[in-house]
Image (cartoon, rainbow, N blue to C red):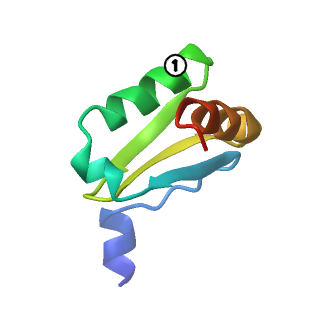
Amino acid sequence: MENASKEYPVHQMLGYIKLSLVGLGISTHSGIASKVLNILSENNIKYYMITSSEISISLTIEKKDKVKAVQALGKAFDL
């Protein structure tokens, strides 16, 4: 295991959180990821490390933007 940590170093990122949107509609409606990224950009929220699956989109944002991101996305998706 010791060699693995040298080959694949682990970095800790403080001040960031993972934001996930989960729902069956992600796989059945096209353009959801684009809409999410556009909403974040319009609200000056930087995003990093994006991943997705059939039912979820996850990305990393700065912790200070958590409330603003949740409110903007909730409003955009009528939640």
Q: Residue at x 25, y 58 (%)?
A: 54
Residue 42: quarter of image: top right
Q: Left or right: where does residue 53 sit relative to residue 47?
A: left
Q: Name the residue: 54% across, 26% down.
A: 40
Q: In the orientation shown, which residue stands out farthest toward the bottom?
A: 1
Residue toward you, 28 or 40: 28
Q: Is residue 59 above or below residue 12?
A: above
Q: Nearer the viewer, residue 1 or 36?
A: 36
**Camera-side residue of 69 and 59:** 69
Q: Quadrant of residue 66?
A: top right
> In the image, residue 45 lies at what x, y percent?
60, 25
What is the crowding at mark 1: few (fewer than 14 residues within 10 Å), some, or many (at least 20)?
A: few
At mark 1, the secondary structure is helix
Question: In this rendering, is residue 60 above or below 36?
Answer: below
Q: Amino acid at mark 1?
A: Ser
Please give left or right for residue 44 compared with residue 5 in the image: right
Residue drawn at 32 percent across, 49 percent down = 26
Q: Which residue is mark 1?
A: 41
- In the figure, is residue 33 to the left or right of 70? left
x then y, percent, for residue 23: 41, 58
| Depicted 6 relative to depicted 29: above or below | below
